[in-house]
Amino acid sequence: MKRLQYITFIVLLSFNVVAVAQTRKELEAKRQEIQQEIDEINSIIKNTESKGQSALGEYEDLQKRIQATERLIQVNNQEANLLTREINSNANKIDRLRTELEKLKADYEKMIQKSYRSKSSKSRIMFLFSSESFLQAYKRIQYMKQFAQYRKQQGEEVMLQTKTLQELNSTLFEQRRDQEKILAQNRKTKANLVGDRNNLEQLLASINKEKQKYAKELKQKQKEASRIDREIDRLIREAIARENKKAGSNEKTTFKLTPEAEALAADFAQNKGKLPWPVRSGVVSMRFGERPHPIVKTIKVMSNGVRIDTEKNGKARAIFEGEVSQVSKIPGANIVVMIRHGNYLSIYNNLQKVFVKAGDKVSRGEEIGEVGINSSSGKTTLIFQLFKNTTKLNPERWIYKM
């Protein structure tokens, strides 16, 4: 019965360790993901420091880093708290195991002493010969065998429990070391956060002194973005009309699909939320939709897609297999590549070099061009959009973890 309870304890302990390991693994993955985001933001800030970007751009970059740092601190706290709970739990388990081990050793010692007193072959023979019947002799033989087997099991249990105790002690040491490492990192991260918040307050004060100037700057940028969006809308309608004309249709707003194109569109739709990023690494600097500017709140910022700041000379990648529908030069926006996936379109804007041409078949993840520099911010920025026919889609709902 005791052995069954002990085995049950070990099994439950193993399940608990696996569950905790999985949780810590998830937190560690999240921490690395946020740290990578911070590294990318730092790289973007460093690359634009010498290009004289406006205070608005500096503010936005600093705000993104602050938000990412706050998330990193939160994850660090979660992992530290998890380790605290596990350290306490393991300390209690160690105390309980030590108590059980002492009792087990005491029982084992008594058994060995008893066995020693009756270990001579003469004693065993006399024990058998003193039997009153053959049946009693047989039973006494079985008893001696069972006693020997039980003694062996007790010895194994002592060894097994001693090993478990050693492993728990080792785990506890590692957990305490990891916890101290995380807490030290958090202290450093919090110090960086305080510095960033102070710089943000100074920038905000500087911006507020010239609010009219920055409001004018934002209006001009929004006007330019609207012009580019209208040009892209025109290119989409042209592409639909051109492709439908080949199929003998006059429809100008909806693609007429062949069975093959219909299957591709269905496959594309099934991958919603799982599509890869259109760049290898990057940070979303402007999200989809309309919202007030975070500083100059009288100005509403409208985006028909997402803007992704990426590494210098970063490459744009096709998010899904399809056919290059169009490659066009838009004044003020470098080159735009439009890829058709049935009746879906993925659009890659602000490319300075292009590796494909209209009619090319592309595969998922294939590099299609090199991202250009945004003249107003000095950053390497991809403007990425998604459409179903002429309907704008929010890329954040389609791209994995955007």
Image (tube, helix red, strand yellow):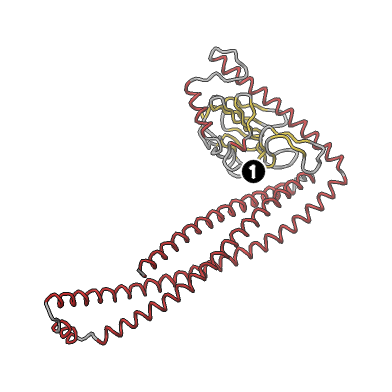
Q: Residues within 10 Å of mark 1 (few under 14, many from 20)?
A: many
Is residue 184 found left or right of 142 in the rendered image? right
Helix, strand or loop at disc 1? strand
- Image quadrant where residue 195 sits: bottom right
Where's the C terminus, which quadrant? top right
Residue 134, above or below 319 = below
Between 213 and 81, the one lying in front of the other is 81
- Image quadrant where residue 375 sits: top right
Query: Which residue appears farthest toward the front when viewing the image?
Result: 132
- Image quadrant where residue 162 sits: bottom left
Query: Which residue appears farthest toward the left when viewing the image?
Result: 134
Between 290 and 234, the one lying in front of the other is 290
Is residue 193 found left or right of 172 in the rendered image? right
The percent coordinates of residue 14 (x first, y second) are 43, 62
- Residue at position x 68%, y 32% in the image: 304
- Residue at position x 45%, y 75% in the image: 98
Between 150 and 315, the one lying in front of the other is 150
**What amino acid type should be assigned to the residue bearing mark 1?**
Thr
Name the residue tied to disc 1.
Answer: 310
The percent coordinates of residue 9 (x first, y second) are 42, 65
Where's the N terminus, which quadrant? bottom left
